Amino acid sequence: MKRKDFLRAVSGALAALAVSALPAFAADLEGKLVIVTSYPPDTTVTVKKAFEAAHPGVEVEMLKKKTTAGIKFLQETATNNKADMFWASAPDAFEVLKGDGLLAKYDVKVQGIPEKVGAFPINDPDGYYKGFAASGYGIMWNTRYLKAKKLPVPKTWAELADPVYFGHVGMSAPSRSGTTHLTVETILQGMGWEKGWALMKAMSGNFKTVTERSFGVPDGVNSGQFGLGIVIDFFGLSSQASGFPVDFLYPPITTLVPANIAIVKNAPHPKAAAAFIEFLLSPEGQAVLLDPKIRRLPVNPATYAKAPAGFPNPFKDPSLGSAVKFDLDLSKSRYNVVNSLFDVMVTYRLDDLQNAVKAIHDAKAKAQGKSNADADKLIAEAEALVAKMPITEAEAGKKEFNAIFKKKRKKADTKVTGRQAEVEQQWDEEVKANYAKAKELAEKAASML
Amino acid sequence: MTTVSRSLWGPGAVALSLALFLIVFLVIPVAKVIYVAFQDPNTGALTLINFVDFFNTSLFQESFFNSFYVASMSVVLASVFALPLAYFTTRFNFGGSILIQTLGVIPLIMPPFVGAVAMVLLFGQNGSINLLLDEYFGFTIPFMEGLNGVIFVESVHYFPFILINLSAALNNIDRSMEEAAQNLGASRGRLFRRIVFPLAMPGYVAGASLVFLKVFDDLGTPLLLNINNMLAPQAYLRISSIGINDPMGYVISVILVMFSLLALWTSFLALRGKDYATVQKGGGGLMKRDLAGWEKAGCYAVVILILLLVLSPHIALTLLSFGTVWSFSPLPDAYTAQHYVDVVSTSSTYITNTLLYAGLAAGIDVVFGTAIAYVVWRTGLPGRKLLDYMAMGAVAIPGVVLGIGYLRTFYQFDVPFIDKPLASWWVIIVIALAIRRLPYALRACVAALQQVSVMLEEAAENLGATKSRTVRRIVVPLMMGGIVAGFVTSFATAAVELSATIMLVSQESDAPLAYGIYEFMQSASGRGPGAALGIIAVLIIGIATYLSHRVINKKETERAPQQAAAPEEKVQGA
């Protein structure tokens, strides 16, 4: 008994010593930190533990919200803000919050983080949000599924449009998932508006489904509901690390985009928030990202020395994420139009699109090895109809046109003509008619062979 | 005359405070959100142009048709599941009736996200059943393709509404009616057609209309199955997308509300002008008879088949919670108990929070439900129907809309002494749950009240009992079956609700189970623990349901020991 008491007294004294010996800034931190985040517990719990070990005395609370819900939450609660930080992937989400004046500026003290990853600047040029990890987009697949269905592994986006993949591919919608939006925008920027959309739609014709959540895609591939998915890298890498029979690769046209963190304006615990950013960018914090459950690409090049073999390194591998020079301003200028176009042409018309694409596949298969100019011409016409866009790139980028889709008008006198529902209905009519016509032409071509 | 108006004082005050509660916590927050539907997106002026757009858009027309089709087909399929279970267990001496009734309620307790994941694993195109069929017979069945999947999942999920309400109604039928019919020489089939079925009608309609409404408004299932061309998903997708404040989402919400009210009104009309009340209270409802051997075997076969089908999501969920990796194979690769160990050590707060929130919410619901039912059906208060419509309207409010409305309305309002905005105090979650589940409790209470004859109350009042005494001593005890049914439904569904909760949880220590499951299900390694947490939720609620069934059955046998004995003699006599 006595010995125990003695030990307790000694350990108490040691603890007191340790606390008083801590650097002055650590003692000044607030006791609490509230972070609104879209990340799963695998990420948040692991990082939280590491941070609390580095800064004992700060209790971190992670408030899990879907990115979109997180934005709504911060907007609705701004008048009486209780959150310190916003921590999520999509830079666009931070742009929205920045635009609403809900973020605070912060200067990072950690050294050694480069300006850019791939062709993308890591930090917000205006200083509101910071990149802490990079993410690229690619293709993940279920190895058992591909083996059972005897499907090859696709290496490029274009291969996903091949007839063999019909009904085997899944993707989320850009309007639902900020990361998916970046994938679509990357393809559009990498191949050009017309060609990019043509490929996007040819690929979408092979979709089994358009999932509502971005996590729906890895979930579907993991369980084998569909064989291939278009996903952000860490979904593929962490699924693999969890034991699922899946694999992942980056196609040549991809962008590396930073995942971000920012301090909310009027944060109740600003010092703890600053310490969290510094920790996340420090060598220890960056190493946490390599945890098999997280698997994100660190932004600190030195950290890759600790990475497992075969782990992608964007600072060493020049092919990774530098083929497309991603233009954030261009993406921003047509953000909602691209979302809406995708929904009208793919998400809500998936059945019609699938029917058209299937008919074209069948006609092409029949035309193989035969020469029938008329049929070939009809097939080409059908393909052109599927690819046809309701608006041009110039129109999509026009400010006045985008205003129809804007969330909030900054000034009451901003003049807008037309309503989103009206515009979408026009597109829908046109797109539906085109798909039906394409199916008809392809079937006609097939009957001629 | 003066006595009549004085007798209305009590109910009047009750009605007024109920109305006030509903206005503050339902009407104002929702109005704040759907106001957008009536704003011109460009000028902000009041307009109906958005509704014109709605009806001109082919996508919305299609969505409307799909929602209607799915809701109707789900009622049909749910009836196929519910009718045999309800009838067999109330009509015949059937071993394990309580167990069957309890198991029959379990499908209602399917936590979001895990349910559809589990169903897809079993019945999906590459699910267990189809993988096996494909391997041995070379064909597959599209259970889960397109709208089929939604109808299948929804009817499995919601058929207990019909089961609970119909069983309560069957148990409430006055035995003397049946005896009278038999004395007059009615055959069994005729007895069912002309006496049992019509008298059980209020229960069936109450259940069926709930199924219709729930399916019509349901968001989670179509979203998880990635079906977008239905009204509720369209509304949600439009409201919750970043950067789009498209009024169409709100327009669809208004249309959902209107259509639901219309459906309710139709069900009122269907029951109007008929008197379902019976004067005497039969002991245990219908006279139970024994089954011949082969009849029994047939009944058990049907019951077991139905139970297997409706419990299949839970079976799959159990496999998932014990499985290591389950990918493109009929069964998981290996089994482990690790997920449970992980969950129990980290997530006990979720469990206690859920019991607290759902229990409080269901308690509020049955008290309010009984009060509203009484005010609406037993008093002549002006505007009483409005109270009913208002409370039922909650069924049509998408959870997200209510959540956003609460944040918008109550965030500026600090609770005294706690110094926290009301919108981030845990009590707001209870209120949101209570409002969202009030319609279930209310329907159950109304159905129960409709079966209690006014004459019993009049008799009590003639004997000098006051209004409140009559309600306490006569009406409420006679309604007890319906009230407990309402409590169970509210509790069970509140315990797994997510859509409003997810907007309102402001700190993790306040989060309920559904939120925890949602968190787990967002990562590849979280599927097992998420499923384990789901199974724990199902077990807790299942036990609670079973216990309340035990309580009702015990109460009813205690209440009518003589009556229970009497029919037996008759059966022997016959």
Image (tube, coloured by chain):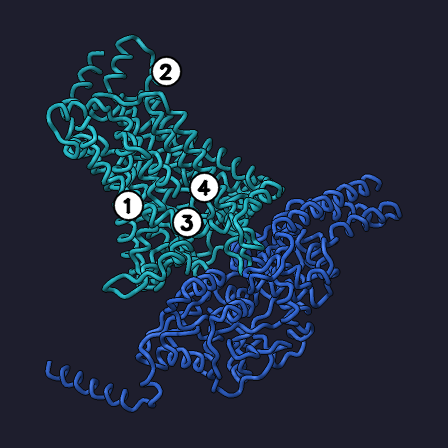
Q: Say which amino acid is labelled 2.
A: Gly
Real-space CA distance between mark 3 and mark 4, rounded to the nearest whole angstrom: 11 Å
Tell me the crowding category of disc 1: few under 14, some 14 to 19, or many 20 or more residues within 10 angstroms, Cα based: many
Q: Sequence-wise, which precedes: disc 3 or disc 4?
A: 3
Q: Nearer the viewer, mark 2 or mark 1?
A: 1
Q: Name the tint of chain B in the rendering.
A: cyan
Q: Sequence-wise, which precedes: disc 4 or disc 2?
A: 2
Badge 3 and badge 2 both on one subunit: yes
State the blue chain: A
Per the image, the residue denoted by label 1 is: B362
- Left or right of B306? Residue B224 is right
Q: Quadrant of the N terminus of chain A?
A: bottom left
Badge 4 and badge 1 both on one subunit: yes
- Going 47% across and 50% down the picture, which residue do you hit? B35
**What percent of the width, then of the height, locates residue B491?**
30, 45
Q: Quadrant of the C terminus of chain A?
A: top right
Chain that bears disc 3: B
Per the image, the residue denoted by label 4 is: B257
Per the image, the residue denoted by label 3 is: B30
Q: Nearer the viewer, mark 1 or mark 3?
A: 3
Q: Say which amino acid is labelled 4.
A: Val
Classify residue B448 by image quadrant. top left
Badge 2 and badge 1 both on one subunit: yes
